[in-house]
Image (tube, grey):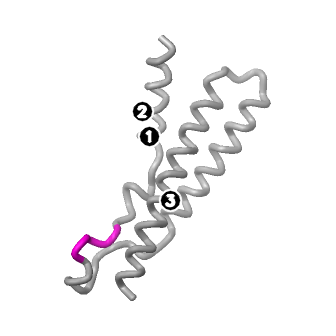
Amino acid sequence: MRPRLVATVLVISLALSGCSLAFVHGPPKEAAEMMPVDCTTARTWPIVDVLFTLQFGFGALGATVDKSQKRLTPIAMLAIALGFAASSVTGFYRVTKCRGVQD
């Protein structure tokens, strides 16, 4: 039963995380040939992902200190925080690529 529970936590954490994955679009691969390029230049969604990363990261830390929480709570919160962190890195990368193409 333990592996099924871990798999469930990972799937839920990936489903809940990712503003940048959903809303930030990088430039197309053939961007040098086609101008103007339609992609995301605002860093809003990656910053939102950073804020959620911090929230769930500190929540996981607090859940480990709080002995009344179940053992799985900090693990789940950390998994969600890592999902948001990955989304944030992806979002900042896409925005940087987009800005580079548009300059």
Query: In terms of secondary structure, what is the magenta stretch mainly?
Result: loop
Mark 1 is surrounded, within 10 Å at the Cα level, by few (under 14), some (14 to 19) or many (20 or more) other residues, namely: some
Question: Which residue in the structure is indicated by mark 2?
Answer: 11
As drawn, 5 above or below 24: above
CA gap between label 1 and label 3 equals 15 Å
- The disc labelled 2 sits on which kind of residue? Val
Q: Quadrant of residue 82?
A: top right
Gap in Å between the C-alphas at discs 2 and 3?
A: 19 Å
Quadrant in which the C terminus appears:
bottom left
Q: Is residue 73 left or right of residue 31?
A: right
Kind of residue indicated by mark 1: Leu
Q: Which residue is mark 1?
A: 14
> Which x, y percent locates residue 68?
75, 21
Question: Quick check: marks 2 and 1 in contact, CB under 8 Å?
Answer: yes
Q: Position of residue 36 (x, y in %)?
A: 26, 85
Instruction: Find residue 73 and name its label.
Output: none
Find residue 30 and report its horizontal and vertical position in percent.
22, 75
Q: Secondary structure at mark 3?
A: helix
Give left or right: position of 93 versus 63: left
Which amino acid, by three-letter code, is at mark 3? Val
Q: Earlier in the sequence, mark 1 or mark 3?
A: 1
**Magenta residues, as a range?**
26-30
Find disc 3 in the rendering and name its residue: 89
Q: Is residue 33 magenta?
A: no
Using a 10 Å C-alpha cutoff, classify the residue at mark 3 as few (fewer than 14 neighbours), some (14 to 19) or many (20 or more).
some
- Separation of disc 2 and disc 1 at Cα? 5 Å
Tag 2, which secondary structure? helix
Q: Is residue 91 above or below residue 84?
A: below
Q: How many marks?
A: 3
Q: Position of residue 73 (x, y in %)?
A: 63, 28
